[in-house]
Image (tube, rainbow, N blue to C red):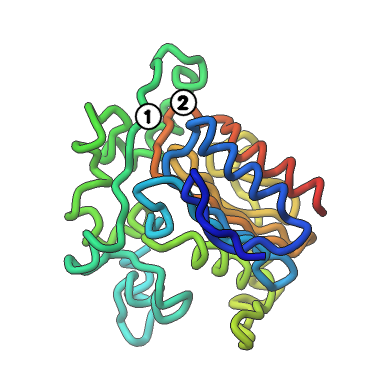
Amino acid sequence: MSSSPTDNNISGHVKSGWESVRSVFERHLTDGLNIGASVCIYYQGEYVIILSGGWKDAKCQWKAAGELIRRVDSQLRSCGQFVRDELDKEFYIGVSHSKIKACIAPLIRKEIDRSFSSFRSINPITEKTITCSGTFPLNAPNSDEDIFNDPRMHQAEISAVSGITNVHILARIYARLIADVKEDNETKNCLLSKKTLALATENVTPNGDFSHVMSGDGFGHKGVGGSLAFALTSRQIAFAHVCNQIDLSTLITDVRSTRFFTAIETIL
């Protein structure tokens, strides 16, 4: 089922049976939790949801070890070139200047009460991790001065923080990490063997660590401010949600993610 624009400017595709996820997506816009956002879900190797909505359209809100890759790659490619060649040609780490204005939506900081317990509870190690040791501070005075709105950041190849793509490509990469993907009458092969996937997703961080998104055979990463991407091998599902409103009060628990999880679990 195709979805035409509505008052919340939502458009995209929803497979029959997945309408409740669309309802959750629209609720986030109506409640003001998102300004512009996109969500994409692959299930059993095919996409079942691709939606974008709101304003300053987040469908171009492109999101993610350079020297290590260059050292082991026989072609001596940069991190950005390696990712485009091996993962997806539409996933960028470092964007040319000509594409910045056309394809990257600015991030908007949500005004928050810094006395919120979830904001105060960030431990020093977690804050150091998500700010790259303070290089990208959480306390920019306003959205215009946010480092992630700086064109120089968009052009830089910083593998830990400057991955740039749209929600469809992000979900598809996660889907291809666990299985073949069928799309546009073409089959894209799984990127990893089962053995390599098991080794790559073995958890080596303590429970409760910021980077420990899921347990069992699930793996993924939570972005600062509300974005999230993950795959769950046993359910053959890959999920990505990106948004242009950055809410730093949700660093620990985000109601948007919780609502999506509930809707997906009900469907499955």
Percent x, y of residue 85:
41, 81
Image height check: is 245 above or below 166?
A: above
Mark 1: secondary structure: loop
Image height check: is 232 above or below 84?
A: above
Mark 2: secondary structure: helix
Percent x, y of residue 82:
38, 77
Q: For this view, does 56 lie left or right of residue 25?
A: left
**Front residue of this view, candidates 170 and 10:** 10
- For the point 27% across and 46% down, which residue is it? 148
Q: For this view, does 213 lie left or right of residue 195?
A: left
| Disc 1 packing (10 Å; few <14; some 14–19; many ≥20) | some
Amino acid under disc 2 = Ser
Amino acid under disc 1 = Lys
- For the point 46% across and 25% down, which residue is it? 249
- For the point 42% across and 39% down, which residue is it? 35
- For the residues bearing labels 2 and 1, Cβ distance under 8 angstroms: yes
Q: How many marks?
A: 2
**Residue lying farthest to the top in this orientation:** 115
Where on the picture, by quarter, is residue 176? Answer: bottom right
Q: Which residue is identified by label 2?
A: 249
Image height check: is 117 above or below 205?
A: above
| Disc 2 packing (10 Å; few <14; some 14–19; many ≥20) | many
Percent x, y of residue 77:
31, 79
Q: For this view, does 264 lie left or right of residue 80?
A: right
Q: Which residue is identified by label 1?
A: 110
> How far separated are the C-alphas under marks 2 and 1?
9 Å
Q: Quadrant of the C terminus?
A: bottom right
Q: Which mark is residue 255?
A: none
